[in-house]
Amino acid sequence: MNATENEVTGWRWTMYAGLIPLMAGLFMLLTSNLSMSNDMSQWTFIIHKLDFSFAQLAVIDPQAGPFVAFLAMLASVNIVSAAVPIILISIFALRAGQKWAWYYLLFMLVWEGFSDVYSVTQFYFETGAPMFVMPWLFCILMATGLYKTRQQIFN
């Protein structure tokens, strides 16, 4: 993509930021399905395993397994559904200088980014699973993109 005369420079940073939750959501969907399909093995994130299996959840309570399955599927689908608008708005609206796009992406940095950083960092301290890299990377890329585009958007 060649830069045009009226194109806002720096929009690619926010687009790349949107790829992070897209990958995270798809990764979560994959690993959750792997963990549920082999219910005797430990719950896996590929790079880290938790110390319980899907089958052990049923021992705790018969509704625990379906509840965790529901949360895993719901969360992964919602993460992907938040990522796609970030990517599309970056490409089609922020690049064209639409002010509303900048505000939307700022909202996503605060709402999705900061809450995910907090949650996933807490998860790391509790389990040792190093999933915190993705939301931190999202925030860094998004903040960089918003910083780089702000003057062009608001002048």
Image (cartoon, rainbow, N blue to C red):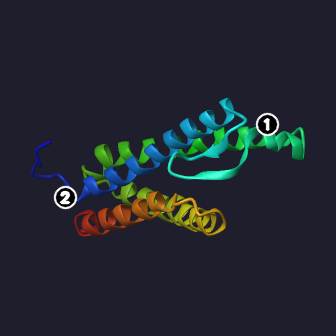
Give the distance between the C-alpha atoms of the residues marked 1 and 2, in whole angstroms: 46 Å
Q: Does dot 1 land on a helix, a strand or a loop?
A: helix
Answer with left or right where residue 57 lies relative to residue 150: right
Residue type at tag 1: Pro
Answer with left or right where residue 3 lies relative to residue 12: left
| Number of other residues with Cα within 10 Å of mark 1, as a class: few under 14, some 14 to 19, many 20 or more | some
Q: How many marks can you see?
A: 2
Number of the label disc, if any, that sits on residue 84: none
Residue type at tag 2: Thr
Q: For the point 62% across and 33% down, which residue is it?
A: 33
Q: For the point 80% across and 43% down, which residue is it?
A: 56
Q: Which residue is mark 1?
A: 66
**Is there a contact, CB below 8 Å, between mark 1 and mark 2?**
no
Q: Nearer the viewer, residue 52 or 71?
A: 52
Q: Does dot 2 land on a helix, a strand or a loop?
A: loop
Closest to the camera, between mark 1 and mark 2, is: 1
Q: Which residue is mark 2?
A: 9
Q: Nearer the viewer, residue 43 or 97?
A: 43
Q: Quadrant of residue 140?
A: bottom left
- Image spot of residue 48 (x, y percent): 55, 52
In the rendered structure, which disc, 1 or 2, sits on the residue that comes first in sequence? 2
**Which quarter shows the N terminus?**
top left
- Compared with residue 62, is residue 50 higher up or lower down, i.e. above or below? below
Q: For the point 60% across and 34% down, which residue is it?
A: 34
Q: Nearer the viewer, residue 123 or 105?
A: 123
